[in-house]
Amino acid sequence: MAEFLYEFYLSLARFLKFIGVYAMMGFLCLLSLVQIPLLNMGDARQGLIVAGLYFWLIYRPALWPVWLIFILGLVLDLAGSGLAGLNAFSFLGLALIIRGQRRFLLGQPWHMIWAGFVVAMTCLHLFQSLIFAMTEAKLPDLWFLAANILISSLFYPFFHPLFMAYHRYLSEDRQEYNEIK
């Protein structure tokens, strides 16, 4: 009975630790929807949620199945005033690319991870601008697009250390469990 209770406690503790990842992403989702005076560039705030998604897809991809990524994008689409489904499909495409490059990215130093994020943000903004250009029949302002990409890309260095610390915290559970057994 004591072993069962101990196993239950470990399972509950692990569950609560992993809920923190979703809480962080929920906070970033809410933050990306709030009007921030310096970040009223339109799509620049989207970099907040993509920073978290990018990190967790590299370091803990099992936490983000395809259906959850789609729901996250759909929630952002419905809560924002954008084209319905655009974020959902953009995030899915981005997730497929990141998962395809995961092995390469895991072995890279931090600045290469950030460079990958810049490329991801550039692809995401270009894709979304192309879709908007097709639906509105006008070309996007390239300076505005470049500014969005730059501002979005600057979010990642602020969040990477926080995400990495939490990733290490999640890994401690596995080490402690192996030492006890």
Image: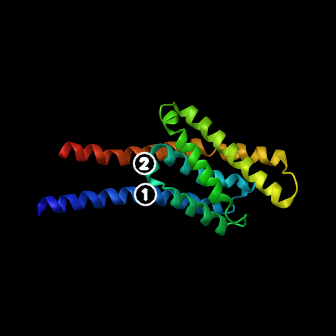
- Residue located at (84% from left, 51% from top): 140
Image height of 148 relative to 103, above or below: below
Which residue is under mark 1?
20
> Would you call the spot at circle 2 few (<14 residues within 10 Å), some (14-19), or many (20 or more)?
some
Residue at image x 68%, y 48%? 124
Q: Quadrant of the N terminus?
A: bottom left
Quarter of the view holding residue 71: bottom right
Image mark count: 2
Q: Which mark is residue 164?
A: none
For the residues bearing labels 1 and 2, Cβ distance under 8 angstroms: yes
Question: Crowding at label 1, few (<14), some or many (≥20) Cα neighbours within 10 Å?
Answer: few
What x and y, as percent, mark residue 7? Answer: 21, 58
Between residue 83 and residue 29, name the one nearer to us: 83
Q: Position of residue 73 (x, y in %)?
A: 61, 60
| Residue 144 coordinates in the image, percent (x, y) | 81, 48
Q: Amino acid at mark 1?
A: Gly
Check disc 2 and report the residue beneath it: 166
In the image, taking residue 175 as reference, residue 104 lies left or right, namely right
Residue at (57%, 57%) from the top-left corner? 28
- Nearer the observer, 161 or 64: 64
Q: What amino acid type should be assigned to the residue bearing mark 2?
A: Tyr
Q: Nearer the viewer, residue 149 or 154?
A: 149
Residue 139, placed above or below residue 71: above
Image-based side of 44 in relation to 96, left or right? right
Residue 147's place in the image compared with 64, above or below, is: above
The mark that comes first in sequence, 1 or 2, is 1
Q: Judging from the image, what secondary structure is the residue with disc 2 in?
A: helix
